[in-house]
Amino acid sequence: MEYLWWVLVFFTGAAVGSFLNVCIYRMPAGESVVHPPSHCPACGQKLRFSDLIPVLSYFFLKGKCRYCGCRIAWQYPVVEFVTGLLFVLAVVKYGITPGALRIVVLFSVVIPAMAIDLKHKIIPDKLNLAGALLGIPLIFESKEVFISGAAGFIAGGGLLLLIAVVSRGGMGGGDIKLAAVMGLLLGWKLLLIALFVAFMLGSAVGLAMLVCKLVRLKEPVPFGPYLALGSVVAALAGDKIISWYAKLLAV
């Protein structure tokens, strides 16, 4: 029975991942994420339920559209699998609690933010707005959670806004809004961990890309993926990082 429970959690996450794929595909184009129903982007054929089973349909169909034979992008099963896995890890970490719900909402925002920013170098306002609207009711769990979430929202948006002003555009508006949503859902302590990880990863990868001449100096590089990775690290291991750092200071 326990095994079936984790399978259910995984496929719930994978089903959310299937919807996130729709967001990734349609949001940058300004299209509705609910209408028309899911269809093949190549031939326009409406997809049946058997075509939409998360992860599994991709392999059953051998990575091709049933109707026109067009290749299905690998992004679809990857996003579904990663979302399902992160849902499982969130429940393992937090149990069936409001805290776990905040984290799965966070994952459901940062995954499409990462994919869209990598491809289009934008983070849609509608995505950040959805994260905020879903997150605000969840911080009313307790006074402590509310204060931490509100402080995180202000700190996340404020810190990146300050960087944008000082650097004269070195940080995009989508990044600023995403950081605010991260703070709302993580709370201010875990937000600081997420931002630290994001900036460390971004600096390391950016330096490596400069050395390898993959980008030019001052060329804009998407920061959303690093915010997303920082969020995942903070959500799943942030408390351990804080504990380790506190012990280090006490030595």
Image (cartoon, helix red, strand yellow):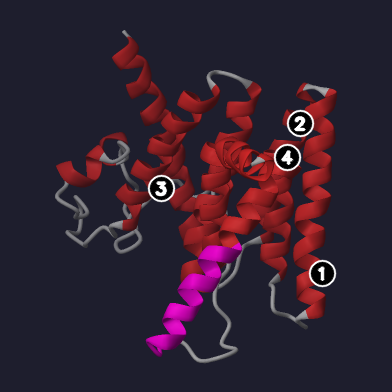
Q: Look at label 4 and name its amino acid.
A: Gly
The residue that mark 2 highlights is 139
Q: Earlier in the sequence, mark 3 or mark 1?
A: 3
Q: Look at label 2 and name its amino acid.
A: Ile
Q: Is residue 201 magenta?
A: yes
Identify the residue shown where x is 43% and y is 34%: 13
Judged left or right of residue 6, residue 175 is right
The numbered mark at residue 162 is 1
Judged left or right of residue 30, residue 14 is left
Structural crowding at the residue carrying mark 1, measured as other residues with C-alpha within 10 Å and reported as few (<14), some (14–19) or many (≥20): few
> Which mark is in front, 1 or 2?
1
Q: Nearer the viewer, residue 33 or 145?
A: 145
Name which quarter of the figure residue 59 lies in: top left
Q: Nearer the viewer, residue 195 or 104?
A: 195
> Which mark is in front, 2 or 3?
2
The CA distance from mark 4 to mark 3 is 35 Å
- The mark total stands at 4
The residue that mark 3 highlights is 38
Give the magenta-colored segment's residue range: 199-213
The CA distance from mark 4 to mark 1 is 19 Å
Residue 83 lies, in percent from the top left, at 42, 41
